[in-house]
Structure formats: C-alpha cells, structure tokens
Image: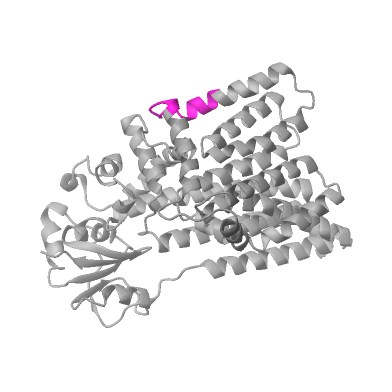
Amino acid sequence: MIDNLLTKHRELIKNLVFSFLFLSSLFMLKNNLQYNISKPHVDEIHTLNYGISSMYSGEVTNLRVGESTRWLARAIYPAALYYMNSKMGGVPGITSWRYPSGFYINKNYKSPKSIIGDPNLQDFTFAMKFILGALVLLSFLLASYKISKSFGFLSGILYFVFSSSTSLIIGMLSIFYTESSFIIIINLIISLALTKKVNVLRLYIWSSLLLALAISTKITGLIFAIPIIILILKRDSFIEKIKIEVFIISTILFIALINIYAISYMEVLDQSLSNVYHFKTGHKMTRSSSVYQFSKILESLSPWIFIFPVALSFLIYKKSRELNFLLSISMSSIIMIIGMIGVSYFLERNLTTPLIMMILIISVFFNLIIKFIKFKPKVIFIVSIIFTIFLHLFSVSSNLLEIDSALIKKSIKDSEKIAVIDVENYLLNGFFKLESAPETFNYFNDLQNLRNQFTEYDCVVIKRVKNNKHYTNYILPLDFSLASRFGDYFVFKKKSL
C-alpha cells in the first residue's frame, strides 16, 4: 500500500512537503516579527526611510546603501499601507482624510526610532518586514524546488531547512536590509541556472538584470558576475561578440534605471566606494584584520565552514551534475569570505550570502552521499521526509517566542492603578477589568466618555481583539504613551504632565 502511494502520488507528496516547510517558516517569521514589533534597527533608515521618502521627494541623497533594497521597499509600500490603514483607529470626521496612508508616514516616520511608542508605525514596519521575509522564503522555495529536480529531493529540502534554520537567516529576516536582497538574487540565479529550457533572449535579459540588481545592492554584488557568466556559458557555449556587448550594455542600462532616484551617478559610485573606507578603517572602534576576523568567521559559520571543503571535494570527485555552476558558487563564497578577513570592522550579517552558497554545496553533497551508500530509493525518500520535517519542526519550535506574564509584569511594575482589557487571566490576573471597545459608537458624541473611563488609571494593558483597535491605535495614545508591545498586547502608561 505504501509502495503504491509513493509511486502514484510521489510528486504530490513532494509538493506537500515543500508547502509545509514554507508555511511553517512563514508562521515562525510572523511570530518573531510580532514579538519584536516595537524594536527598530538603526540601519533601516537607508532602506525603509530613504526608500519611502524618495517616492515623494523624487531623489535619494544618501546612497551608501544600494538602491535594490529600496526598490523592494517601494514595491512593498502599498501593501504595508493597506495593512496599517486596516489597523488604525479613529474616523475621517475626527482625524481628517489626511490622517492615514502616506500622509501619516510622511508626517511621523522620520527615522527607525519613530516607531517607538507609535502603534501605527509599528504595524506599518511589521507589514514591510513580513512581506519582505515572505519574498525571501518564496525565493528559497523556488530554488529548493529547482535543486530537488536537478540533484534529488533530499538536496532540495535540505537546502530549504538548513538555510531557514540558521541564526544568520533568522536574524536577517528581522530587519529590512541588503542581505535579504542578496539572498533573493542568489536564489533566482540558482533557479535560472537549474531551469532546463530557457529562451536565449530571456537568459541574457534575466542575467543582466540580476547582475545589475546585485551590483546595485552592495559593491560586493560584483562577485555575482562569476556564477552568472558560468550560467550564460552553460546555456550558450558559443557566445558571439555581439551577445557579449549586448549583455554588458543591458547590464549598464539596468544599473542606470535602478539608480534613477540617485541625485547623480557619480554620487552612487562615490558613496558605494566609501563603504570600503568604512570596513577597512572600522566603525567607532577598529581592530586589526586577519586573525581576529578569521576567528570570528569560523565562529559564525560553524559547522558549515568545516563541512564545506569536504563537500566540495566530494562533488569534484564524483563529477556532480552542474559542476561548473556549483564551482562558480563555491568560488564566489570563498572570495567573499577572504574579502572579510582583510577588514577592520566585523559585521556578522555580511556572512549570510556566503553561508547560503556553502549550504547549497553541502545540500547537494548529502544527497550524493546517500546515493553513494546505495540505499533503496523509496527508503531514502521516506527517511528524507521524516528527517527533514523533524529537523525543521525542531528549528521552528526552538525559535518560537511566546508572550508570558513575566514580560508584561515587568512593563507594569512601576504602576499602581492598572486596568486590563481582554487580556487572558493566565497572563494577568487581579487587576481591574474594563470592557472591550464598543462594536458601535459615535466618535463625535462618545469620544470624550471613552477617554474619561481611563482617567483614574496610570496604566492600561490591552489586547487588540474585536473592535479594540480604536483604543490601541487612536484613543489611548491621546492620553497615554505606549510603554511596550508584544504583538497584539499593548502596555500604555499615562503621559506625564
């Protein structure tokens, strides 16, 4: 019966496994972002703030971070506005029509720190990060599917599980920054390389676009030229002179279009190269290069960096499929790591892209090892599914963050008169309970009464359910400051006079 099921529905089972991996990773992403919803990251000024403001001003003046990630911000912006608007309180007659949407963002979102104490901006940045994270996970899903078709099912699911469970990727998904752009690009390059039939014209267009996006993310994006050139050579072994010229010209044109918001193209070059100075001299403090950086790299990339040379050697020995492409990915990873040894400022997140490249090699290696041992294909298939699902569930459960009473009690420890609204008893008990926001009320007639019910309390803890968004996102912020927030749980403290 099991044999029959595996034979008839093999592809369906594979698709279900990939769907499970993607959806559970999406759940973990949402959980992590909600838990840290009120925590800004200083570097997001380069991607979120400058990217969004440029849509209104028409230009970006600070170009130390490339434009590609800001384009992702611009693309996601309308969906994030929709989400923020759906969570806001108030009504147009009270707040005016120039209160929500871009009007609110332009007025209040001046830097990453602007989200502190502002529930509406927190909802907005949560949506921006969640959608970006979903795009990253989708790119992993696509690449994993293509890997499974080319190297075996085990390789594909291991690539997804290993990548999504690493601390570097989990940390990367919590901020809106350039590493996410790099990961999407490298996954698209992998997918393009492993697609069996690609029209030559499409090949050149996609290759030049991906290279332009990589270069316009960070200056290290130039390294992506290695796998892209190998990709083109594999598909088009006889590259005519005109094709090379078209590829170079189209890449330059794409770079020009991507950087259309820049105040000048020389500013793009100058400010991009200024990052070389930044990393070579240090950031606030400076450290000598080589030994310290190398030790930090080994620490951050363990155990992958030790498995990688063994895996690469085995792929060369067994003359793996797509060997030239895999070698180009390996070379790119090695060059990136060597480049980091020679800097005076270590930033762990810069290892994210070379790590993913190493994981690709390691995933293919494990699949080849299993085949080399010569287990039965059906046994490999079943064990692969059980092992990877168990490993993934362990990773998800290890990284899930729960709201507990200690967190909320810590936020209210200095308050005397505390009211709670719709907060579960297991989280907070023994405090005065107020009713949820009315399902129907007239803002003009009832606003003052709704505000007055909170006047005797110096702290209000509320869960945003039912119609409580009118309390959390409009009425309470009129008289209270948002002290802390964990997902849909808000702790408000009365503003000092």
Q: Position of residue 443 (x, y in %)?
A: 16, 53
Question: Is 488 covered by the magenta stretch?
Answer: no
Q: Is residue 258 above or below residue 291?
A: above
Q: What coloring was used for the rendering? A: one colour
Quadrant of the snapshot with the C terminus: bottom left
Give the residue drawn at x 75%, y 55%. 309
Closest to the observer: 190 or 31?
A: 190
Tell me: 34 left or right of 325.
Answer: left
Give the residue drawn at x 24%, y 60%. 471
Q: Position of residue 314 (x, y in %)?
A: 82, 54
In this rendering, the count of numbered labels is 0
Q: Is residue 277 above or below residue 474?
A: above
Question: Is 255 covered by the magenta stretch?
Answer: yes
Q: Position of residue 304 (x, y in %)?
A: 67, 60
Give the residue drawn at x 61%, y 69%. 394
Quadrant of the snapshot with the N terminus: bottom right
Q: Position of residue 197 (x, y in %)?
A: 75, 33
In the picture as drawn, the residue positioned furthest to the top comes out as: 242
Quarter assignment of residue 78: top left
Magenta-colored span: 253-266
In the picture as drawn, the residue positioned furthest to the right comes out as: 374
Closest to the observer: 274 or 289?
A: 289
Give the residue drawn at x 38%, y 37%. 62
In the picture as drawn, the residue positioned furthest to the bottom comes out as: 430
